[in-house]
Amino acid sequence: MLSDLTTQFMKAHLHLDKALRLIGTNEKGHETFFDTSVNGGGLDSAASPMETILESLAACMAMDVIPILQKQRRTVNDFSVDLTAERAEEHPRVFTRIAMEIHLISPDATIRELARAIELSETKYCSASAMIARSGCEISWEATLENPDNHSKEHVSSKQLVEAT
């Protein structure tokens, strides 16, 4: 993430709350709750560790893409990411494929600017993406840019960028 460029070391603490619900706390005191299904011994009251990794990938990318566009003086009215992940059948059940559907609403950004911002996040800035990709997981994305002023929609994908090079 762009805002974490100067952070070299991180510390966190994790403790058992009840059943298998866990509470992680970072150095700033921010808490993250983790849980598992009732069948797995948990309370099903929070995201699982793997779900938080998936969400963190999207958050890390968003925290790069949005500021990149804003530095280009582009308006970001809304930004969202839907993710679908496949996991290995055998333990450890790591992610093998992740597909991201990125949606930007902006009256003045171009599809080219959005694609470049995503590419910069993926290849240069997003630590979560780099860690997941280095594990052998295939990450792909499709992006939609919606202009609320003229009601147009444009699409681009990581596959199109690879084919263009």
Image (cartoon, rainbow, N blue to C red):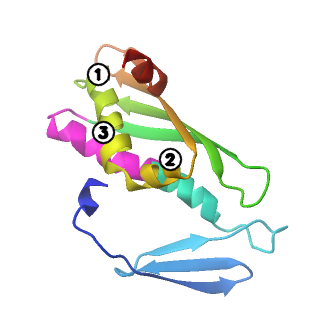
In this view, the mark in front (1 or 2):
2
Q: On the rendered structure, is 80 left or right of 83?
A: left
Q: Which mark is residue 120?
A: 3
Which amino acid does the dot numbered 1 rest on?
Arg
In the rendered image, residue 82 lying in the magenta stretch gets the answer: no
Secondary structure type for disc 2: helix
Report the front residue among 86 and 84: 86
| Contact? badges 3 and 1 (CB < 8 Å) | no
Pair 2/3: label in front: 2
> In this picture, which residue range is highlighted in magenta?
58-75
Residue pushed farthest right? Answer: 39
Mainly helix, strand or loop, the magenta region? helix
What residue appears at the point 50 percent right and 47 percent down from the top-left corner? 133
For residue 76, say whether it is visible: yes
Q: For the residues marked 2 and 3, what is the alpha-carbon distance in whole angstroms?
A: 15 Å
Q: Residue at x 19, y 32 (%)?
A: 74
Mark 2 lies on residue = 133
The answer for how far apart the CA atoms under marks 1 and 2 are is 23 Å
78 relative position to 40: left or right: left
Image quadrant assignment for residue 108: top left
Figure label count:
3
Residue count near mark 2 (Cα–Cα under 10 Å), binned few <14, some 14–19, many ≥20: some
Residue under circle 1? 112
